[in-house]
Image (cartoon, helix red, strand yellow):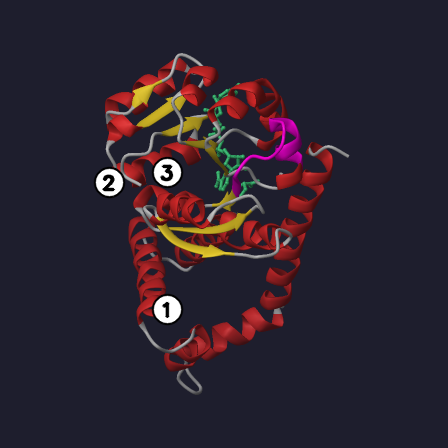
């Protein structure tokens, strides 16, 4: 896959994360081209990573073996319709990272019969610690599946889902998920400060605790519930805190939050798709 030209349409936060991860993984920066109306962003990406800048989206498509659609869902239809002829001529593998936009809508906007993989990465891709769900459309060959997977694997863990509807669940879980953990960190840090700890100490202890817990969850053969129990001495401090979190219905709240995010993803596909 190292000799394939990967073209990014849109060079914002997520494209930057993916490009940073690919380059850190040893991908040849001269095999990455990016397009964005914001020329400062492009110049910055070029200077940071040594990648190529395209004059415009059409110029990027003309060179693309893989075309990554990394613009906001709200403008994806306009972008796809504008690029349809060029995409039909070039026939790249199209990889979308847009939340909530269905394959059938993108196919229609791009003129149909395009090899298309939907993906839902997350921002830790910047540190090659991303988590990405992927779904392949019917016309995607095994080689193209491997190609899409190897691009996203360069920036972290990948999991395929067979049913496209499950992309909405993955969006709610891992796409949005970093924000939930940041919120928990904010809450823990603020509570520690309220209880008298100096702010810098509260910040550092919070972040390192999150990192340590995540590493234990990844590296241990025990699941999170067992690891939690091992921290919780009978009659001790953790037990008291967990009782209070349970009284506040933390699990029910997370269930509502993820369901809300999934439903928003479904709404976005209705609002922004072709119906
Ligand atoms: N931010 C996140 O955590 C995640 C975002 N996503 C998806 O990634 C996509 C991009 O999101 P972000 O990078 O956060 O947004 P962003 O706003 O940082 O980046 C979008 C980029 O598109 C550019 N753009 C605008 N009009 C354009 C055009 N006509 N042609 C080419 N580029 C154009 C903008 O200048 C901007 O640089 C969205 O579809 C979002 O759903 C997916 C997973 C996680
Ligand atoms: O909030 C959003 O809509 C995007 C998709 C997942 C993360 N950010």
Is residue 12 placed above or below 188 in the rendered structure? above
Give the camera-side residue of 226 and 202: 226
Distance of label 2 from label 1 (alpha carbons) = 25 Å
Q: For numbered disc 2, what is the local secondary structure? A: helix
Q: Give me the residue at 69% from left, 49% from top.
A: 263
Q: For numbered disc 3, what is the local secondary structure? A: helix
Determine whether, in the image, residue 62 is placed left or right of residue 102: left
Residues at circles 2 and 1 in contact by the CB criterion of under 8 Å = no
- Tag on residue 18? 3
- Determine whether the beta carbon of the residue marked 2 sits less than 8 angstroms from the nearest atom of ligand 1: no
Please rate how many residues cluster around mark 1, counting C-alpha atoms within 10 Å: few if below 14, some from 14 to 19, many from 20.
some
Query: Circle 2 is placed at which residue position?
Result: 24
* Span of residues in magenta: 105-117
Mark with earlier residue (2, 1):
2
Residue 112 x/y as whole percent: 62, 32
Q: Give me the residue at 30% from left, 21% from top.
A: 52
Decide whether residue 190 is among the magenta residues.
no
Give the camera-side residue of 232 and 57: 57
Is residue 86 placed above or below 240 in the rendered structure? above
- Which image quarter holds the C terminus? top right
Is residue 85 placed above or below 261 in the rendered structure? above
Mark with earlier residue (1, 3):
3
- Determine whether the beta carbon of the residue marked 3 sits less than 8 angstroms from the nearest atom of ligand 1: no
- Determine whether the beta carbon of the residue marked 1 sits less than 8 angstroms from the nearest atom of ligand 1: no
Query: Circle 1 is placed at which residue position?
Result: 217
């Amino acid at each position: 896959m190292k000799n394939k030209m990967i073209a990014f349409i849109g060079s914002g936060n997520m494209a930057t994360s993916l490009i940073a991860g690919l380059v850190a993984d040893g991908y040849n920066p001269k095999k990455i081209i990016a397009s964005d109306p914001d020329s400062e962003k492009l110049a910055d990406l070029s200077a940071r990573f040594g990648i190529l800048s395209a004059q415009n989206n059409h110029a990027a498509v003309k060179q693309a073996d893989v075309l990554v659609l990394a613009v906001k869902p709200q403008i994806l239809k306009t972008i796809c319709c504008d690029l349809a002829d060029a995409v039909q001529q070039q026939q790249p593998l199209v990889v979308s990272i847009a939340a909530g936009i269905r394959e059938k809508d993108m196919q229609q906007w791009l003129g149909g019969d395009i090899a298309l993989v939907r993906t839902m990465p997350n921002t830790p891709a910047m540190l090659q610690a991303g988590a990405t769900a992927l779904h392949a459309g019917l016309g995607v060959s095994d080689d193209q599946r491997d190609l899409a997977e190897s691009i996203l694997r360069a920036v972290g863990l990948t999991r395929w889902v067979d049913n496209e509807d499950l992309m909405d669940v993955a969006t709610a879980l891992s796409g949005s998920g970093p924000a939930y953990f940041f919120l928990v960190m904010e809450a823990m840090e603020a509570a520690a400060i309220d209880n008298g700890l100096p702010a810098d100490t509260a910040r550092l202890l919070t972040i390192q605790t999150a990192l340590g817990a995540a590493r234990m969850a990844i590296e241990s053969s025990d699941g999170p519930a067992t690891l939690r129990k091992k921290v919780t001495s009978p009659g001790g401090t953790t037990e008291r805190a967990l009782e209070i979190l349970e009284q506040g219905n933390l699990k029910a709240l997370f269930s509502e939050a993820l369901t809300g995010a999934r439903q928003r993803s479904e709404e976005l596909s209705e609002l922004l798709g072709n119906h």
